[in-house]
Each structure stands twice: as structure tokens, then as C-alpha cells.
Image (tube, rainbow, N blue to C red):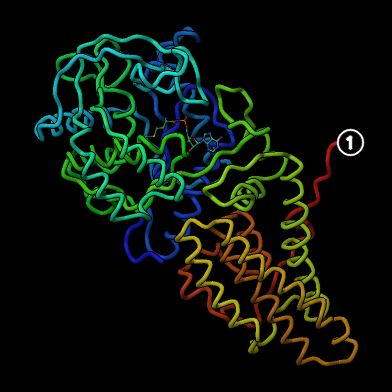
Amino acid sequence: MSDRAFYVTTPIYYISGSPHIGHVYTSVAADVLARYHRANGSAFLLTGTDEHGQKVAAAAAQAGMSPQAWTDSLVTKWQAICARYEVRYDDFIRTTEPRHARQCVEVFERLKQSGDVYLGKYAGWYCTNDETFWLESKLVDGRCPNPECGREVQWLSEDNWFFALSKYRDRLLAHYRERPGWLRPERAYNEMLATLEGGLEDLCISRVNLDWGVPLPGGGVMYVWLDALLNYITALDYGDDGALFRTFWPANVQLVGKEIARFHTIIWPAVLWSLGLPAPQRVFAHGWITIEGQKMSKSLGNVIDPFEIADRFGADSIRYFLLREAPFGSDFSFGEEKVRLRRNGDLGNDLGNLVKRSLAMLTRYRDGRVPARSPSALGTRFETLGRRIGAQIDELGFRDALESIWELVTALNRTIDEKKPWELHKRGDEPALDALLYELCEGLRWLAHAIAPFMPATARGIWAQLGLEGEPHGAWATELVWGGLEPGTQTKPSAEGLFPRIDAPA
Ligand code: ME8
């Protein structure tokens, strides 16, 4: 649990198209962390759009628009997808904002002062799709060596600024060896360590012949990846010596897809060190959403539209599916049938029915009023699990945390089946019936709290049906304690289930 300000970031997404479910995946994971830490202290969630670079300029040209007009026309979609999935960001940064460009120039000057920036000639290859410089020796059959790309590369011969990345190799190696947990999962850590052991080249950090980017003093623009990485500190007003920066840096966790781990765990810490700043505490390079074994990506054109899928299944069902389907570090395939199974099974049959039948029995036997508190064998189990789920979220074990929560959903459903309230009622065993009904309602209050970071709308729905004001947001250490629900509370069950069944199209 957090006792200090918690800072979590997503990558800033290339604006050169519409968001797909892969982007939503990272943003939702960041939102879960932010919601959890906000409840237990304070948190800052940063996301945004990466708006410079050759790729964006080319896409704008193709649309017959200026790059600025083009990005302005697209950014609303990227903000709308956050709203649709309730990704509650504290800031949404666009790299075309003046605050960002101004600070990038300031950073460039500071890097120069540190002696790590020099003028040189870049003669080599460039992949516009990946916005990456490639050495001749790395190309595969003369094309981009990234297996997800493989496109033609362009020859560049330019006088550019370089960053002395190679100088930081030993420090990076020491950092990796001293802090094996700083980059997760282990596979990403091992891969990056091997890259470092293989040696590091200095990095070209300007593009003298381009004009769509952050203009640098003396001409040219900043290399788009440096420009993009700096968003994590310009959003906190680093270059303006802002208070946010002092509060939130270093980031507690930076989330990225595994394909961009190298930028975040080799280049980024070196740039930060050159500025005299600490590296982020942790980077998590999560797995890919795949379709038939291939990464879902704009360039492959195999994307799932996140607006459309949310309209059909509900944003919370998709949030649940994304984080429940696979461990955060692993790839998994996205399929509608799988979404439907989770929606109708875990959500509808398990959670939805639990809420429905618990509140229906309370209405039938007690006019919907919560009975007196009573001790419960489940209470201690709930409290222990509450701590465990917190620890699982801290470790980005979203799937583990959801499985733990579902242990309790199952336990409550089983209690109903075993204690058979209808028989208690028939026998006239009122104390036992009161105890069971309190146990169920308090269990629902507890569950609403625990699922709130994952499924905020569902949590609000349960909260409202319990007749509680506002929404669950208090600290876990005080809220996930048995007995929080006030006896006498008048519940307000809704006729409509939380997760009506969704059948496959005929
Ligand atoms: O790389 N599965 O932007 P981008 C899981 N602008 N996550 C996915 C995914 C998939 N199939 N596809 C995309 C860039 N993502 C740069 C980043 S940061 C300083 C600059 C998610 O639009 C995942 O987080 O290509 C991935 O790293 C990111 O979107 C890439 O988004």
C-alpha cells in the first residue's frame, strides 16, 4: 500500500490513427493502479499522445492536412476512449503543446551542459514506421529488423546531435544487476540485460532535415523518441522546476508494451542520469494482445475497435476481460467468444447473480433493510484476502487479484447454497437468517470496494443497490474491515441485473 504520492504512466500513443483495444489495455492497467493508490493515498496518472515524427507528418500529408490540423482532429478520439473506459487520468499530454516543446529545449540545453551531447554525422538507416535508427549490420535482408515491422528502411546521411549513450553502459549494467525487480517481467529484464551486455552505440537525437518536431536551437528538430520520452517529466513541469515534479518523480511504475522496453529501460534511464535525475522505480513491459497469433496493431490492420466492443459488452466487462484473461506479462489472444464467456460466466452467473439473489432475499425476508451486525466466519477470511489483493495489485498481478476477489464471490454464493436461507425462513430460525443476510450484504459492500479499481461502474452499481451514498473510494485498510455496513440501511435493489446475458449473434 502506498504511503506517498504514486505516479504511474502509460506510453503516449502515436496519434496516427484511432485507438484500438491494445492501447486500452495499457491505459486500463494504469487506471487500476491509480484508482487503488488514490484510495490509499494519492496518485497521478499520466497518458497522452505522441504527435511528432515522420510517420505522423506522412499520414497528415496523405490526408491533405497540416500535421497540426491533423493531430488536432484526432486527439479527441484518444481522449474519448479514456472517457469511455473510465480511465481517469490526471493529465493528458500532447507533445505538440507549447509547455512540452519549451521544456524539451530546456532539457536539450541541460543535456548539452552535462557534456553528453555532441555534433556528429549520422550515416545509417532509419525506419519511419518504428521511428528507429538502425545500423547496417542489424538489418534483415536490407529491411527493418523488427519482426513486427520488416519494412523498407531509408538511408540517412545527416549532421546531427548525438547523445553519449555508450557512456552509460556500465552504470546501466550495475543498475540492472543491483535491482533485478526494476524491469518486469523477468523475460524483459533478461532481454534488456543481454542487449546491454552486447554493447551500446551513441544515439542520434536530432533530425536536421525534418521540420515536424520540437525545433532545436540552431535548426532541425529533436528525434521523436527523445521528444516522446520527455513527456513523463515535462507533464510534471520538470523544465519549469515545478512542484508536481518534486512530488511525483521518480515514477513508481511506467507501463509499456514489451516492444518499446528498450527505449524505456536503456535510453530513458541514461537520459535521466545525464540530467542528474533518478530512473523510474519500476518499468513493466507487458505482453501483447494478439489476433490469431499476431500482435494486434494498426499497421497489420487486425485491430478491435474499443468503442464498438464497449458498446456491445460494456466497458467494465472489457476491463475485466483484459486483466483477468492472462498474467500482465504474457501475450493473450482477444476473441469475442472468450469475452462473452467471461461476461456471462464470471460476471453474470457469479457476481451478477450473487448481488441479485442476496438483495432479493433481503427484500423478501426483511423488506430490504440490513439486519443487525453479527460475527461471521467469512469476516476474517475477507480481511486477510483484502491485504493479499492489495499486495497483488502492488505487484501488478491483476489476474491474481481478480482471482482472489472471485474466491470471495464463490464463497458467498456457496454460503447461500449451503445455508439455504429459504429453509431457515421456513424453520423460523430468525437469528440464523439475520446473520446470513448481514453476511451477504456486508460481503457485497466489501466486494464493491475491492472491485472498484477494476470495474468502477459495477462497483458504483453495487454500492447504489446497497443504498449507500456516493461511491466506494475510502482507504482499504479501513474499508476492508468486516462490519462496515450499517444495520438498518435500506437497500435499493435494481430490477435489471448488473450483467444481463449476452448471446452470440445468430
Ligand atoms: O509506441 N497489445 O506508440 P503506439 C498490447 N508513441 N498493448 C498494445 C498493443 C497490443 N497489441 N498495441 C499497442 C508508441 N499497445 C510510442 C510510445 S512512449 C514515450 C512513446 C499499447 O501508438 C502498448 O502499451 O505504437 C504499446 O507499447 C503502445 O500501445 C504502443 O503505442
**How many callouts does the rendering have?**
1
Q: Mark yes or no: residue 267 visible.
A: yes
- Tell me the residue at 51%/73% (across/down): 479
Rendered location of residue 108, percent (x, y): 18, 29
Residue 139 appears in which quarter of the rendering? top left
Residue 193 vs residue 503: left or right?
Answer: left
Nearest the viewer among 233 and 472 is 233
Rendered location of residue 158, percent (x, y): 24, 10
460 up-or-down from 339: above or below: below
Mark 1 residue crowding within 10 angstroms, few (<14) / some (14–19) / many (20+): few
Rendered location of residue 8, percent (x, y): 39, 49
Residue 171 vs residue 227: left or right?
Answer: left
Residue 498 appears in which quarter of the rendering? bottom right
- Tell me the residue at 35%/16% (across/down): 136
96 up-or-down from 417: above or below: above
Residue 328 vs residue 340: left or right?
Answer: left
- Tell me the residue at 55%/26% (across/down): 18
Mark 1 residue's CB less than 8 Å from ligand 1: no
Inspect the image, locate mark 1, and give the three-letter code of the amino acid beneath it: Ala
Rendered location of residue 353, percent (x, y): 78, 63
**Split into 4 quadrants, where in the image is the C terminus?**
top right
Q: Secondary structure at mark 1?
A: loop
Residue 201 appears in which quarter of the rendering? top left
1 up-or-down from 292: above or below: below
419 up-or-down from 90: above or below: below
**Split into 4 quadrants, where in the image is the N terminus?**
bottom left
Return the residue at label 1.
506
- Tell me the residue at 25%/26% (across/down): 203
Q: Mark yes or no: residue 7 visible.
A: no
